[in-house]
Amino acid sequence: MSGNRNAKRVDQVIGRVVGLWRYPVKSMAAEALHAVDVSWHGLAGDRRWAFVREGLERSGFPWLTLRQRAEMRRYVPSFVDPARPDASATRVRTPTGADLDVADPVLAAELASDGARVIRLDRGAFDAFPLSLITTATIAAIGDRVGMALDAQRFRPNLLVEADSAEPFVEDTWVGRVLRIGALRMRVDARDGRCVVITIDPATSEREPAVLRTVAHEREGKLGVYGSTVTPGRIALQEAVAIEEDG
């Protein structure tokens, strides 16, 4: 008993953050970040807005996403006050160059001809958990299998980590563990189940079904990991990622 009480936590560095993104509007373009505060509800400003399809409000998945409208990637959201994203008005630049408030009915009508409305969610519109992470080696391995270079944005992570291990899929071994990144402590909760969204090229919106087929056949349909906040804090690019160990 006394040995357990006196045990000290040892943080083993396992990599560094090389990409950091939030998505102010679910399924729209990402905002690349140099640093960001992370709360119990994920990255500040992440997925705080989402479009709900008409007639599906009470369904298990009411959101209008890239599955229905791949061109949503070309809509670029931004905060009027970037320093206070969770309290800021949100604008969206459309592919034609129009600058609209996210709640402007014109935007909803443009996105969904069969009807949609935007809602704000202070806790974020997440599919499962508020944080998502994938490693560079994992993306490269799937790219090798399908014979093409894959942009990390195809997988829409919050954090892209370059692990010290060159082995792909190493993040799977972190499930159930706590990572320390800057002032943030993040629990890795589960592997990330993937859908048709990963077939969509983030630059061209063209679909490559082989990406999802490969993940389905070789990785049980899962790639990268989901997580949640244990201790809120600020994180930044190039910061070390460490895994907590008792010893």
Image (cartoon, rainbow, N blue to C red):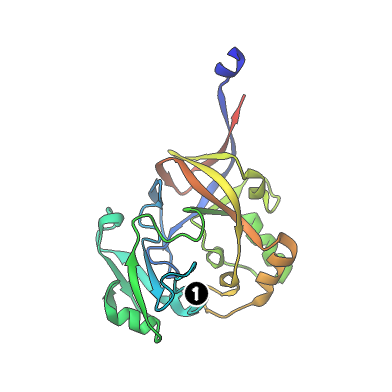
Give me the residue at 50% from left, 43% from top: 186
Q: Which of the 4 image quadrants contains residue 232?
A: top left
In the rendered image, residue 200, in percent from the top left (x then y), is placed at 56, 75
To which residue does mark 1 refer? 66
Q: Is residue 22 left or right of residue 160?
A: left
Labels in figure, total: 1
SS state under label 1: loop
Residue 75 to residue 84: above or below: below
In the rendered image, residue 82, in percent from the top left (x then y), is placed at 29, 57
- Decide if residue 136 is in sight here: yes
- Decide if residue 135 is in sight here: no
Residue 48 to residue 234: above or below: below
Q: Quadrant of the N terminus?
A: top right
In the rendered image, residue 108, in percent from the top left (x then y), is placed at 34, 79
In the rendered image, residue 185, in percent from the top left (x then y), is placed at 48, 39
Q: Is residue 53 left or right of residue 13?
A: left
Residue type for callout 1: Leu
Residue at far front of view: 58
